[in-house]
Amino acid sequence: MDRHGWSRTTAYAVGAAVLLAAGTGCSGGGDSGAASAALVAPSGTTAPAGTPSPRQGAATPSPSTPPAPAAADAAAWAKWNLTPLPPAPPAPADKPVKLQRTGPVPVFSEVRTSDKVVFVTIDDGAEKDPRFVEMLTDLKVPVSMFLTRDIVKDDYGYFKRLQALGNHVHNHTVDHAQLSKVTPEKQKSEVCDAQAALTQQYGTPPLLFRPPYGDGANTPALNSSVQQCGPRAIVLWRESMQIHDMQYQAADKKLRPGDIVLAHFRGPKDLKGETMTQMFGEMLARIQEQGFAVARLEDYIAAPAG
Ligand SMILES: [Zn+2]
């Protein structure tokens, strides 16, 4: 383990056997089979001695502790026929993931935390359902968006509305290529050209990158491309939302603290008639049933200093 809390050897080795689904795009669950690599922070590398733990167990809530769901919040959840999730705990002061400005980027599918939280990521960008903006506005569930340039370019503005709710935009290539099958030059342009377009549109360079299908995530070639283009980590997932249920990598089919959950911007034609908001509601129900809150992934990540 190096001082940043992940094993680079593990990051490259784990997940070498990425499963690839047939077909194009993410429709059809193609992203659901990728192997995972855990980003693990050694338990000893936390805050300096004497610093109160920012996480659970604190008897006295800090001033930033969010209030319990108010009646208005309960009404918002009821509007969508959902039971409210527990509120997320305060963002940890000492981020479990610390990214570096240069050098190899870590590959991870979960974040080391004892908070009973999971992180929701949404990929591609095909479905641009206005009701989903309404849903996130009502429920205030944080999401991280991994956008594919050529899938979102007909309506960049849709995702600006989600960004305005506090959600971050990340890089998911130019055209959803299967990166292990393309030349190094094409691989680099898939990452760099998407980075440029998303930076121009959303005003800030994407910090994270996700390869379509998780393909190539643990290869030195892709790691090098990502380094050259700007993102500072490659993010995979532990669970993949389908239409009504999640596909789990864990044999016991249970969420664990810090898991990253994959979903997609999909509509009725990819969801057997279900809408984006129905799918997302089902996902929140699966999370609620297991007693987890949804936290913001970027709150657990320290971007490179400087
Ligand atoms: Zn995708």
Image (spheres, rainbow, N blue to C red):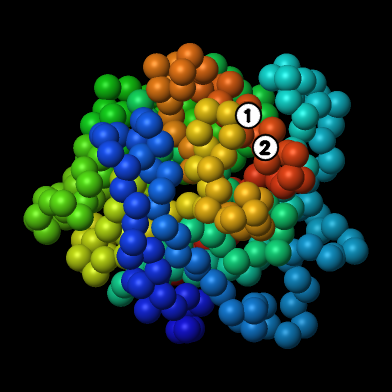
Q: What element carries label 2?
A: helix
- Write down the residue under mark 2: 286
Indicate the quadrant containing the C terminus: top left, top right, bottom left or bottom right. Answer: bottom left
Q: Quick check: 253 left or right of 56?
A: left
User: Is the CB of mark 2 within 8 Å of ligand 1?
Assistant: no
Q: Where is residue 117 in the image (x, y as percent from the top left)?
A: 67, 52
Q: Would you call the spot at circle 1 few (<14 residues within 10 Å), some (14-19), or many (20 or more)? A: some
- Write down the residue under mark 1: 282
Residue type, label 2? Arg
Q: Position of residue 36 (x, y in %)?
A: 45, 60
Q: Quadrant of residue 293?
A: top right
Q: Where is residue 16 in the image (x, y as percent from the top left)?
A: 33, 65
Q: Give yes or no for contact between labels 2 and 1 (Cβ–Cβ under 8 Å).
A: yes
Image point 75% across, 39% down: which residue?
A: 289
Q: Where is residue 51 in the image (x, y as percent from the top left)?
A: 74, 77
Q: Quick check: 301 left or right of 183?
A: right
Image point 82% across, 35% down: which residue?
A: 69
Considering every residue shown, the one lying at the far front of the view is 251
Residue type, label 1? Glu
Q: Would you call the spot at circle 2 few (<14 residues within 10 Å), some (14-19), or many (20 or more)? A: some
In the foreground, 223 or 96: 223
Q: Quadrant of residue 82?
A: top right
- Against 79, residue 256 (above or below) is below
